[in-house]
Image (cartoon, grey):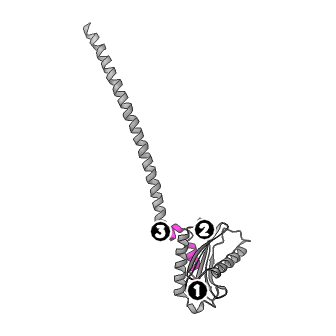
Amino acid sequence: MKLYSLSVLYKGSTKANLLKAAYDLSSFSFFQRSSVQEFMTFTSALIVERSALGSRASIKEQEYLCHVYVRNDSLGAVVIADSEYPSRVCFTLLDKVLDEFSRQVNSTDWPSGSPATVQYTALDSHLAKYQNPREADAMTKVQAELDETKIILHSTMESLLERGEKLDDLVQKSEHLGNQSKAFYKTARKQNSCCEIM
C-alpha cells in the first residue's frame, strides 16, 4: 500500500489551479521521477476540472486509484495511491487536508495562488504519515487488530477442536482398554482359582 501524490487545487470556471502538492516518488527510478510527477500533476488538475462541486470520486487508472474531493467552495484535493490502499482512509485524509488548508490559507488567495506563493507546509508530513494507513487512521488500526484477534480466535478454536477429537480418541481407547482389563481380570481369576485347588 502506497500513496504517491497529494495535491490541493482550486477549481476555477475553466481550469483547475494547483495550490500545493507533495509527492513520494521513491519507488520510481530517478530518471522517471520528473515525468511521473508531471503526469500526476496533470492528472490531478484534469480530475478536479471534470468533477462537480461537492463531489467525491475514485478513478482507476491502470494499477493506480485517484481519489478526489471537491468542496462546494471550489477547493479540491486529489490523492493518488495504489489500488490496495483503503479508499476510506484516502477520503479521511482529503477531508482533513482541505479543512486545514482552508483554515490556514485565505480564500482570496485560492484563485491566483501557486505552489510557490501559498504558505501551507503540512502536505509532506501528511503524505509521510498516511503511508501506513494502520498508524494514521484509528479505524483502520482497530480493524487490523480485530482481524488479528479473529485469526487467533480461529486458531484457538481449531486447537480446541483437535484436543476434543484427541480426548474422544482417548475415551474410546480407555473404554476398549477397560473391556480388555475386565477380560484379563476374569481370565486371571480363573487361572488363579485353578492354582488354589492344587
Measuring 30% from the left and 19% from the top, which residue is drawn there? 186
Label 1 environment density (alpha carbons within 10 Å; few <14, some 14–19, many ≥20) = many
- Residue at the far left in the pictured view: 197
Label 2 environment density (alpha carbons within 10 Å; few <14, some 14–19, many ≥20) = many
Q: Earlier in the sequence, mark 3 or mark 2?
A: 2
Hey, what amino acid is under mark 2? Lys
| Label 1: which secondary element | loop
In the image, which residues are magenta?
118-138
Q: Which residue is mark 1?
A: 74
Q: Which residue is mark 2?
A: 2
Looking at the picture, tell me which residue is in the foreground, 155 or 68. Answer: 68
- Residue at the far right in the pictured view: 31
Q: Judge left or right: residue 35 versus residue 3.
A: right
| Label 3: which secondary element | helix
**Number of the label disc, if any, that sits on residue 139:** 3
| Label 2: which secondary element | loop
Residue 177, image quadrant: top left
